[in-house]
Image (spheres, rainbow, N blue to C red):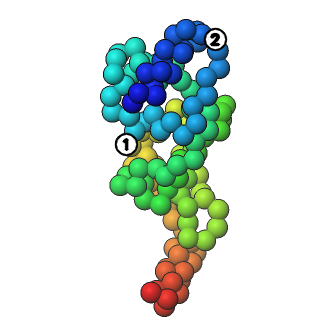
Amino acid sequence: PKELVVIEKICNEVGMGTLVVLLNARLDKVKNFGTDSATKLFTEDFEPVFCLSAAPQEEAPSCLMYRAFPGDWVLARKPKVGQPKTILSQGTKPTREECKEAYDALEVGDLEKNVEDFVDNVAGWFR
């Protein structure tokens, strides 16, 4: 994207000692940064300081990813009732494979399962 070319130029001019903040940049969605130096800048040199997004839904359905710098990346499952339940916490952003492994290892208790089944049943009355 053109905007990233401009940001790369600014970073090269002012140096990496200058704080540059990108809001909602979604750099993980960019397929081609244009140059190797731009790829390195945006994938290795920039540090995500806040993230709240859906986890890869094929690997971890109904899960969220969260990070607030300097804390760890958190993968959490959002039950139908109650707060999200952390299923993985680590210093680096979880890969799709790590999300799948954490989700597959998740144990849902009988009470939680029964409550979710009940909520699904009641919700079905209104469809």
Q: Residue at x 65, y 38 (%)?
A: 68
Nearer to the camera, 70 or 106? 70
**Quadrant into which the C terminus falls:** bottom left
State the separation of the CA atoms marked 2 and 1: 34 Å
Which residue is found at the position 43% from the left and 21% from the top?
5
Query: Mark 1 Cα within 10 Å, few/some/many (few <14, many 20+)?
Result: few
Residue 73 in sight from this viewpoint: no
Residue 117 drawn at (x, y percent) = 49, 79
Q: Residue at x 65, y 20 (%)?
A: 19
Residue type at mark 2: give it.
Gly
User: Is 80 on the left-hand or right-hand side of 99?
Assistant: right
Question: Where residue 97 is drawn, which disc sits there?
Answer: 1
- Figure label count: 2
The x, y position of residue 56, in whole percent, is: 41, 50
* Secondary structure of residue under mark 2: loop
Residue 45 x, y percent position in the rendering: 51, 19
Q: Which labelled disc corresponds to residue 17?
A: 2
Q: Is residue 116 visible?
A: yes
Would you identify the image quadrant in which residue 16 lies? Answer: top right
Quarter residue 13 falls in: top right
Residue at position x 37%, y 52% in the image: 59
**Quarter of image, res 98:** top left
Indicate the secondary structure of the residue bearing disc 1.
helix
In this image, 31 relative to 28: left or right? left
